[in-house]
Image (spheres, rainbow, N blue to C red):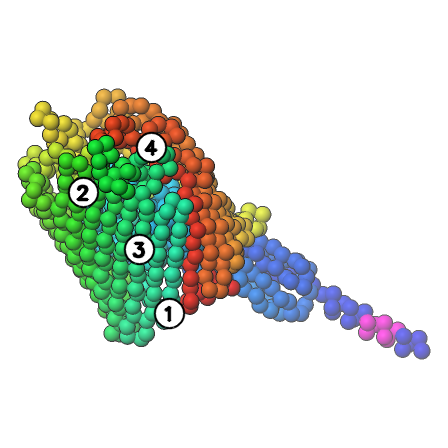
Amino acid sequence: MNKIIMSLLLVLLFCVSINAQTNDVTIKVLSESESIPLPGATVYFEMLAKGAATDIDGVARFTGIPNGQHAVNISYIGFETIQTIINIPAASPITFSLITDGNTLDEILIQSSRSTRTIRKIPTRIEYIGGEELSEKNMMNPTNISMVLRESTGIQMQQTSLSSGNTNIRIQGLDGRYTQLLRDEFPLYGGFSSGLSILQIPPLDLQQFEIVKGSSSTLYGGGAIAGLVNMVSKTPDYDPSLEIMLTQTHALGSTANAFYSKRNKKYGVTLYGSANYQKAYDPEDDDFSNLPETKAISINPKLFYYPSDKTTFWFGINGTYDDRTGGDITAIRDGENGIHQYTEKNISKRLSTQAVYTTQIDSISSLHIKNSVAFFDRDLTIPDLTFAGSQFNSFSEVNYQKQKETTDWIFGANLYTVNFNESDQNLLNRDQKDVTIGVFGKNILDISDHWSLETGLRTDFANDWGTFVLPRISILYKNKNGFSSRLGGGLGYKIPDIFTEEAELINFNNVLAIDKDMLEAERSYGVNIDFNYNTLLFDTIELSINQLLYLTAIENGLLLTLNTADFFEFENATNKITSTGAETNIKFSYQDFRWFLNYALIDTRLTYLEGNPQKPLTAKHNAGSVIMYESPVWRFGFETYYTGKQFLSDNTQTMDFITLGFLAVRNFKWGSIFTNFENFTDRRQSRFSPLVLPPNDNPTFPEIYAPTDGFIFSLGVIIKPFGNEEEHH
């Protein structure tokens, strides 16, 4: 009996010893796309309730893991979570590769770089706006893209007319004519459309924004001295998509947007339409409009043809009609009389086409051919003055791209024409015709796993203005610990035309034509460096920091001066315009919460004036905070923006101010309902200084340095009958 008991005890002890056997386990986590370690990834044994974060080598270490099967979760922000079963014991390390979930910037393909690289691998610094952020800005302002750009660090939307609302984009303190607007890599608007450009681009059919700050003329030719903004349109997918957006503001603005897309094996289509009606709005009750009466409609159909898996051809047409009248409220509503007679009326019509042919020649090379023609007609009428004319633009390009494992090449040539014809009623003869032919080449070389070098050279010949040789160089360093840095610089130029902010402020009244014999093209050089760092705090909070430092200098700056005959004429500045500064962007992410912090130091100096004064209407200090909560059902956003003191043209210093905004969205299977409280503390310039000076029949409009419309409450609905799977889970 004792022998039997002893035998059972020995068997039991043996079994216990087997079950109690434990192991040291090492798990390594990599990104699938680049096979680089992911520091800060979370590895969690569910049944054991044991977890650890990977170190700088992407390795998580565990002790005391018993033999057998174990359920393991491996997660990292921006990547798809792995839920799997592993058998212990196993050979160490056990390696897992995570796939991006599509929300990380590292995997975003960028068009403005003219390559197929992701944002992480491009030496040129490119800022990206897309996805949820773009959707939120659309809800805040569905009529145009000004909201998307206004709230980007270092970008100012400068309103130049109270009556019409004309607005120019300023990047890092430089006038809007130094920024090139692109849509799907086509030069967009500019010239005669001037401050109306931003107001006539509805945002609903746009997929992403790409912003390059600093001289970018090597990439896209003249005009990109301060930088460029490339707007990328949505393209059709096999699953049909329909989105209808209706918005109403308490300021009596109504907007309707609709977008539809669908493709099959051979053909695809996108259809976009937008309509906006805004009643003249006067929040101060000073009898002058802060928002003009506006009737606008825009349509943009595109047809896609896919003759093979390697070739795509698409053709699009864009048509816009915009009628806006601002000024004396009584004159707008009831017609002019003896006292109430000042109105500013802008009627503009636009028709443009785009055609793109792309084919993959072989596994590493492709050919791209594109063409665009655009016609713009505008009538500007104020009492005793009419400025009218039309502008015809054309753009054609062919480029060849070759992408190998460690190097990318692109070679191309383009032709750009601008032909402005003023109405024959004006005797100043301000017609202007420019033709520019350019050839360019660019190379990106991966020197090692950590270093990449981008070099480019462009040569443009501009009829009547000469030849411009534009080199550019950028270098990228990145390591496996979440740190990267970019250093780049290049040259730029801008051909003079009469459509400057100064000329627009006086409605082009008595502005003389460009004298090609007396003026020189504006030239620039610029350099910037930035530092990026991403890490995980407390194993749960993702932190990313970007710090940018920059310098841009412009020679032969185009100035508007009053001559002895009381006419305004253009001349070149005798010294430089310089813009130096810094931009800081910080982002915290925790589960469904995001917190964005930004600060911009903008020091733009007019060194051709005594004392090197700061450029008027340019705040030296700007800061912002955005807190977002995003879940499949609810979305909330709270924004705070600070704008520092500015100087007016007469050297008067303005007040600084803070604006606040709040957005709430409720998602459903059929779409969303949203409400937006923009500038809900009602900060507007009229609280600091007058917007209009008497008399009523011949008013004077001071310079605009703060919001003019104040608090705007809006309510809207987005209806998605189909194609809404990604919005609601």
* Residue 686 in picture, x, y percent from top left: 36, 31
Residue 278 counted in the magenta span: no
Question: Is the residue 561 above or below the residue 548 in the image?
Answer: above
Q: Which amino acid does label 1 sit on?
A: Pro
Mark 3 and mark 1: span between their CA atoms? 23 Å
**Foreground: disc 4 or disc 2:** 4
Q: How many labels does the image show?
A: 4
Q: Mark 3 points at which residue?
A: 275
Q: Which of marks 3 and 2 is nearer the N terminus?
A: 3
What residue is drawn where x is 13% and y is 46%? 389
Which mark, residue 240?
A: 1
Q: Name the residue under label 4.
A: 286
Q: Which of marks 1 and 2 is nearer the N terminus?
A: 1
Q: Mark 2 points at which residue?
A: 380
Helix, strand, or loop for circle 4?
loop
| Stretch in magenta | 6-12
Answer yes or no: do the residues labelled 1 and 2 have beta carbons within 8 Å?
no
Question: Is the residue 246 above or below the residue 250 in the image?
Answer: below
Mark 4 and mark 1: span between their CA atoms? 49 Å
